[in-house]
Amino acid sequence: MKFFLDTAMIDEIKAANEWGILDGVTTNPSLVYKSGRPFKDVLLDICKIVDGPISAEVTTLTAPEMVKQGTELAKIHKNIVVKLPTTVEGVKACKQLSEKGIKINSTLIFSASQALVMAKAGASYVSPFIGRLDDVSEDGMVLIDDIRDIFDNYEIKTEILAASIRHPMHVVECAKAGADIATMPYSVFQQLIKHPLTDVGLKKFMEDWEKAKH
Ligand code: G3P
C-alpha cells in the first residue's frame, strides 16, 4: 500500500519524507488556503521534496476551463496529477486530459458508480472520501470494498486512493480492503507507528541495559 500525505504544509511533508516511506502528496483548495501561500509556490516546493505523484486540484467548474487549467497545472512538474471534481464536466475534462497523457485524480467520490464512471473516463486515481461518509452515518469502508470489487471484476487499473482519512484504523481497514493508496494528514501518519506498549517496553530495555553495563 502506498502512503500519501494530505497536506500543503511544507514542514510536514519534509518531516514525513525523512522517514523514507512517503510515496506522494495530495492537496486541495482548502489545504492550500490553510498553508497561507500561493498555490504554484506550494506545488513547486512539494515537487522538490517528494519524488512521487503530487495532486493539484483545478478550481474551475466547466470542462473547457478544467482542461485549460489542468493543462497548465501539468506543465509545472512531471509528477503533477490533476485533481478534477467528480461531476459531468469533470468526466468530460477527465476524458480529454487523460487522452493527452495527463494523469487525473478524481476527487470528492462518494459512490461506487462515480468511481466507475471516472475510471471509464481515464482517471489514474479515484478518491473516495471515507471520513466524510462516516460523518453522515454511512460506512466509508463499504465504498472502498465496493470499488475494489468492481475494479477487480473488470481488471480496471485505476488506483483507489482512499481519502478523508481521520485515524490509523482507517488506514488499516483500507489496507485490508485492498485500497492502493491511503492519503492522510501528518498527525495520522505519525500515529501509525505509535504504540504505548512500544514506548514502555523500550524504556524498560534501556533502563535494564544501563544496569547491565555496571
Ligand atoms: O484531500 C481530500 C480529503 O482527504 C479531505 O479530507 O478530512 O477534509 O474530509 P477531509
Image (cartoon, grey):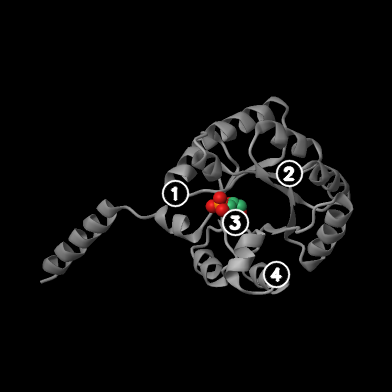
Q: Is residue 71 left or right of residue 6?
A: right
What residue is shown with label 3? 23
- Residue at 76%, 35% in the rendered image: 117
Please name the residue shown 27% across and 54% down the image.
196
Q: Nearer the viewer, mark 3 or mark 2?
A: 2
Say whether disc 3 or disc 4 marks the residue closer to the N-terminus.
3
Looking at the rendering, in which quadrant would you find the N terminus?
top right
Q: Which mark is residue 167?
A: 1
Give the amino acid type for the residue marked by disc 4 in the picture.
Phe
Q: Secondary structure at mark 1?
A: loop
Q: Secondary structure at mark 3?
A: loop
Residue at image location 76% in from the left, 50% down from the top: 104
The label shown at residue 214 is none
Q: Which residue is mark 2?
A: 86
Residue sitting at the far front: 136
Quadrant into which the C terminus falls = bottom left
Q: Nearer the viewer, residue 91 or 125?
A: 91
Does residue 179 sit above or below 100 in this rendering? above
Q: Residues within 10 Å of mark 1 (few under 14, many from 20)?
A: some
